[in-house]
Amino acid sequence: MGLTDEEYALLVKLHGREPTYTELGMFAVMWSEHCGYKYSRPVLALFKKYREALEGEGLENAGIVDLGDGLAVTMKIESHNHPSAVEPYQGAATGVGGIIRDILTMGARPIASLNSLRFGTIGGDREAPETVARNRYLFEHVVAGIAGYGNCVGVPTVAGEVAFHPRYSGNPLVNAMCVGILRKEEIATAAAKGVGNPVVYLGSATGKDGIHGATFASDALGEDNDAKRPNVQIGDPLAEKLLIEATLEALRTGAIVAIQDMGAAGLTCSTVEMSSKGGVGMRVDLDLVPMREPDMTAYELMLSESQERMLAVVERGREEEVLRVFRKWGVHGVVIGEVTDDGLVTVLRGGKVEARLDPKLLTDACPTYQAPLQVPEYHERALRFRPQGYESADPDQALRRLLASPNIASKRWVFEQYDQQVQTQTAVLPGGGDAAVIAPRGTRKAIALKTDGNGLQTYLHPRAGGQLAVAEAARNVACAGALPVAVTDGLNFGNPQRPHVFWQFSEAVRGIAEACDTLDTPVISGNVSFYNESDLGEVLPTPVIGMLGILEDRDAALRMAPKAACGLWLIDYPVDLGPQMGLGASEFLATVMGLEDGVPVAPDLEAEKRLCRLLADLAHSRTILSAHDCSEGGLAVALAEVAISGERGIEADVPSEGLPDVAALFGEWPGRVLVGVSADKESELKSATEAAGLRCRRIGSFGLPETVLVRVEGRERVCATVAELSEAYHGSLPSLLMDDPKGSV
C-alpha cells in the first residue's frame, strides 16, 4: 500500500486503534505522495498562494483569475505519467478527462485544453532500436489518447509542447492542462456543509479499474509494469460530455452546496476532502453506489478511480431538482448518504461499518519529510564548461539540422490530430503564434495560453531552469499580445528520497517562485509528480509552466509572422553571457555538436517583466504586426520560423554581440523577441522601448519572394529557400515515424 512501518505506527497512534482493511486503504492513498505531498509540501510553501492556502481556506481544485466583465478564468495542470507509461492511450485520455473535471467542479465550463509531453528519442542511434520502437509507440498512442478523448468531449486542444530525450525512455511525462470560464458569482466550492444535507453520487458506475492509482503514481516504474495495468482507469469521453452538461445545468439550480471530482483515490478523496474542508462529518452507504460488478467490496468501492464521476452535497429538500437534471441527461444521480455533525467519515457496506475515521487525519496529518540535499558533481562540472570545437560547424547546415531536430521541428503531426476549434472561440491556432488565443463570448477581452519547460536546462541548472520556464512562458503569451497574469505548474521529478533529486526539486521550485513573484504571475494551482523513473533511470527534472495572459482587446492578438512585408526588429535587454557565450545547455550544442553540458543563461526577471508589459502595450496600440520569442536554437532558428510561418523570405543582419558567428546565430539567452514593424510605426517602437528601459534594433526585412538570407555583421552565413527550410521543419517528425527502427514494442 506504500506506507512505511513508521507511517503505519503513526496512523495507529492518531487513529487510536488498528485500522480496518478499508480504513488502511483510505489512509494509504491519502498519505501517498500523489495525494499527501509528503516531500513537496514544505518546499511548495515558497509559492505565495500555496502558502496562503496552507494557512487559510485552500486553493480548492483550481485557482481563479478575474477576467473582468463579471467573468473569471480557472486553470490547472495535472500529470498522468505512470498510467501513460503502462497503457499510453487510456493513460493520456483519462489524464485529459480528470483535469477537465477539476475545472468543472469550480463551476466553470471547460473551454480549452493544453498539454506538455516528454518521450525518449524516436530516431537516431542514441538508444537501442527496441527502445526507439517503444518510444514511438508511447508517443503515437499518447497523442491518439489525447485526441480521442478531447475531440469527443468537445473541449478544444489549443496549445502544448513536445520534447524528446533518452532520459524519458521508460517513463514518459504526460501533463494535461485545462482552462475554464465562469461568472464570478457562480464559483463552486468543495467544502461540504449543512448537517442533514444529502450526499449525491453523480456520473458513471464504479468499477474495479484504477484501484490504487494514487499509490501507483507514488512509486517508481519497474519490470512489473504490465501487471499494473489494472491501476490505469478507462475513460469514456461521451459520458464525460454528458456529465459536463448535466453538472453545469444542475449547478445553475443553486441547490448544490458543494461538489468535487472523484479523481485520485476516488470516493475516498471526495468524501474525506469535502468533509475536512467543511469541518463536518459524512455518512455514506456503499450499497447505494452504482457499480459495474455487484460483488465489489468496500475497499474496492472506496479506492476505485473509475472515470467520469463526481460527488455533491445538495441542499436538503432540493435533491429532486438535481436528480431530475441528471436523469434528463441520462447520467447516474443517486443519494448515497448525508452530512453529519460528528466530524467523522462513516462508510457502510451490507449494513456493516467498514470505516469510521476523522477526515482531518487523512488530509492534514500526513507526515512531511525534509530529504537531505546534495549538489551533484555534474552541476559543478557544467558551471566550469567552456565551449570548443564549435568553430568547425557550418551555420547553413547547422540551421537545417536544428530545424529538423525533434525538439525544434514542427509538431504539426501532433496538433493536426486535435480538434482545435470546437466551441468556436479559438482565435490563434497552434503553430500560428507563440501562444494560443481564446476569445470567450460575452467580453471583448481574450486570453492567451501556453505551456513551457526545458528539462535539460533544469537538469544542468535547476534554479535557472525554473526561472527560465516561467520567463519563457510569460514571454510567449506576451508575444501573443497578452499581459501574463497567472501560472499553473506541473513539477515532474525522480525519487525525492535521492539527495540530488530533492536538491533539483528544491532549487527549481525556488527559481519558479522567484520568477512568479517578480513577474506578478502567482502560482494559483498545480501538481507535483515524483518517482518518475524506471529501470532505465530517472527522468530529467522537468517543471512545466502553464501560463495565462489577458488581452484587453481580442482584435489585438498577434501571430508569429507578419501578414505583409515589413521591417524586422529585435527587442531585448543586455545580458552577460560569460565564457559559455549562450551555448551552454543549448540545442545547438546537443544537436550539432553532440554535447549536453554547460548551464543556461538566467533571465533578468525585472527586465522580463518590463518586456512583457511592453509587448502587451505594443500589441494593444497596434504598433507591431507580429512577435516571436527567440528560444531553442537561438536567433537564426527564430528567423527561420518566422519565414516558414509567414511563407515569405527574410533578409537579416544579426548583431554579433562580440561573439563568434555560431554563438551569435545559435546561442540561447533570454529576453529576445523578433517583431514585425511597418515603416510608419518605427519611431513609436523606439520611443516605447526606450521608455521601458529596453533596447530595439532593426535587423532585417520580412517579405522577400523565397529566400532566407542571414548575415552576421555583413558576413553571409545562411542562404536557403523558404521551401528548403520548411521541408526540414515540417517533414522531420513524419519522416522519423515512418522509418523502421527494427525494434519491437
Image (tube, helix red, strand yellow):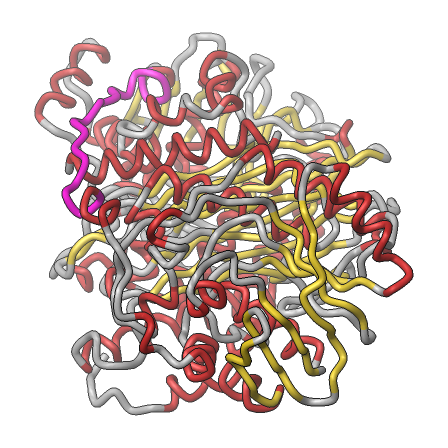
Question: Could you say where residue 619 lies in the image, as x and y percent from the top left?
Answer: 80, 51
Question: Could you say where residue 218 lies in the image, as x and y percent from the top left?
Answer: 25, 42
**592 left or right of 721 in image:** left
The reply to whether the magenta stretch includes residue 374 is: yes
Q: Nearer the viewer, residue 556 or 612?
A: 612
Image quadrant occupied by the N terminus: top left
Residue at the spot 68% in from the left edge and 33% down from the top edge: 65
The reply to whether the magenta stretch includes residue 656 is: no
Residue at the spot 72% in from the left edge and 56% down from the top edge: 437
Q: Residue furthest left?
A: 5
Q: Nearer the viewer, residue 95 or 179?
A: 179
Residue at the spot 32% in from the left edge and 49% down from the top edge: 599
Q: Is residue 423 visible?
A: no
Image height check: is 560 above or below 715?
above
Question: Could you say where residue 717 lies in the image, as x and y percent from the top left?
Answer: 51, 79
Residue at the spot 38% in from the left edge and 90% down from the top edge: 738
Where residue 369 sits, quadrant-wise, is: top left
Image quadrant occupied by the C terminus: bottom left
Image height check: is 124 above or below 407?
below
Where residue 405 sits, quadrant-wise, is: bottom left
**721 left or right of 344 in image:** right
Span shown in magenta:
361-379
Where residue 352 sits, quadrant-wise, is: top left
